Image (cartoon, rainbow, N blue to C red):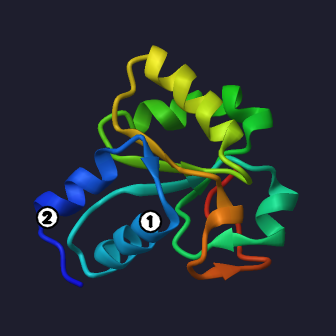
Amino acid sequence: MSYSKEELEQMIENPEISSEVLQTLLEARKAGDIEFILMDIREVYEYNDASIVGTDLLVPTSVIGNHINKFEELKDEKVVLYCRTGNRTGQVMYALNNMGYKNISHLSHGILSYFGEKISNAPIPNEL
């Protein structure tokens, strides 16, 4: 199914994104129809176990305070967070929203709910 740019923008504006919607958004991004950053906030060992194909950044929750500048760089970008079950992303979203970040959503129920393409032992996409 094909979506308009407006429909895609509405999908990503929802604070909680389902597995199906994330798959749609990743396909649309690949086609150049939408821009966003997919960020994993789990720990490195969890990322190595399995990550979502298309992940742009890994910023583990345990060191997120050391990387707050990364969020500052992305303040005007649309960012989709994911963790294992959605609990950590909910907490991070709450904190970031209180800091003025408004373009952040997360994968509802985390990577455990994601039925799209995953990969094990993917290279870490950024310097930690």
Q: Callout 1: 10 Å neighbours few (<14), some, many (20+)?
A: many
The answer to which of 60 and 73 lies nearer the viewer is 60
**Residue holding disc 1:** 22
Query: What SS does tag 1 mark?
Result: helix
Distance between mark 2 and mark 1 Cα atoms: 15 Å
Q: Is residue 77 above or below residue 115?
A: above
Amino acid bearing label 2: Lys
Residue 28 in picture, x, y percent from top left:
29, 75
Q: Is residue 122 above or below residue 25?
A: below
What residue is drawn where x is 62% and y is 58%? 126
Residue 122 in picture, x, y percent from top left:
72, 76
User: Is tag 2's residue or tag 1's residue first in the polypeptide sequence?
Assistant: 2
Please identify the quarter of the rendering in which residue 68 is found.
Answer: top right
Q: Residue furthest top?
A: 98
The answer to which of 116 and 125 lies nearer the viewer is 116
**Residue holding disc 2:** 5
Whether residue 37 sits left or right of residue 126 in the image: it is: left
Amino acid bearing label 1: Leu
Q: Callout 2: 10 Å neighbours few (<14), some, many (20+)?
A: few
* Image quadrant where one finds the N terminus: bottom left
